[in-house]
Amino acid sequence: MSTERPTEEKLQKVLAGIGLASRRVVEGYILDERITVNGEIAHIGQRVNRDKDDLSFDGVPLRVNPELVYYLLHKPKGVISTANDPQGRRTVNDLVPAEPRVYPVGRLDKDTEGLLLITNDGDLTYRLTHPSQGVEKEYLAEVSQKVSRGSLRRLREGIELEDGLTSPARVSQIQDGIIKIVIHEGRNRQVRRMFQAIGHPVKRLIRTRIGNMVDLTLQSGQWRQLNTLDLLHFEIDQVTE
Ligand code: URA
């Protein structure tokens, strides 16, 4: 017997299959017109092709195409966030499965550690890296001394860097020399440059959250695969922000 998936499957089976909810609850969502297929309100019993049709729940895309993969990696220090390095240095792609070919969403600089999304979903990558999207990114920065209230205020209000003023940031010193900073932008080495500008070069930088994605269980170098529901919650968070 073939194990291949039929190209067209019942909508409620696909939605229950990805764990959105039980079939009964999913049917309620369809009747309540919360599900669309290719932008049109869906109906019970409709047949869909997971590889081709765009499904949405409350206007948020449901990523049901089984060929798309999403990894959340805890990048170690010293590894570079490009898919290929002409100089042959260790890249984040060396840490996740080689197939299918995937690419990091944005970058963490070589010395920065922490969470990085890696995927072959170009649409998600575009949405997350487009400057208008402004996904929240949270970092923990370690500097050698306590940062004054005035300097924290400068970080919050915006720092004039060579590529322009930084947008307002949320900043708190959780203990002397350990600062949590949340920014929406993704300029090259932005956090390091902001701290440099206030006279506190960063000794260690860790990204601890992207949007609502956190994972305290991932050790340095470990990754986990994200499922449709992780991505749905992530994207709902972006829409409702
Ligand atoms: N800011 C930095 O300085 N480095 C990063 O990798 C990300 C943000």
Image: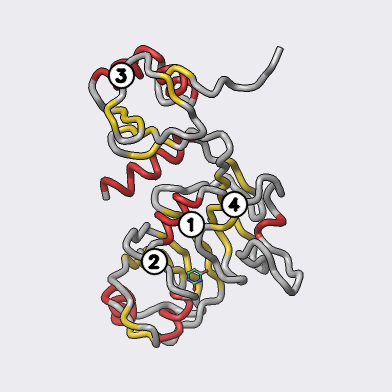
Residue 96 screen position, x and y as percent: 68, 50
Question: Is disc 1 surrounded by few (<14), some (14 to 19) or many (20+) residues within 10 Å?
Answer: many
Mark seen at residue 181: 2
Q: Is the residue indicated by label 3 positioned so its CB lies within 8 Å of ligand 1? A: no
* Between marks 3 and 1 in the image, the one whose residue lies nearer the viewer: 3
Q: Secondary structure at mark 4?
A: strand
Where is residue 52 drawn, in percent x and y?
48, 34
Q: Nearer the viewer, residue 75 or 15?
A: 15
> Mark 4 or mark 2, which is nearer to you?
4
Q: Residues within 10 Å of mark 4 (few under 14, many from 20)?
A: many
The residue pinned by badge 4 equals 73
Q: Which amino acid type is marked by label 4?
A: Leu
Query: How much space separates mark 2 and mark 3, taking CA atoms?
Result: 45 Å
Dot 4 or dot 2: first in sequence order is: 4
**SS at badge 3:** loop
Q: Among all residues in the image, which is located at the extreme right?
A: 88
Marks 1 and 2, how far apart in space?
A: 10 Å
Gap between marks 3 and 1 measured at Cα = 40 Å
- Residue with the mark numbered 1: 208
Q: Are marks 4 and 1 in contact (CB under 8 Å)?
A: no
Name the amino acid type tagged 3: His
Q: In the figure, is residue 2 to the left or right of 57?
A: right
Eye-nearest disc, 2 or 3: 3
Q: Mark 1 falls on what kind of element?
A: strand
Indicate which disc, 3 or 1, sits on the residue closer to the N terminus. 3
Residue 43 - label: 3
Please name the amino acid that badge 1 sits on.
Answer: Thr
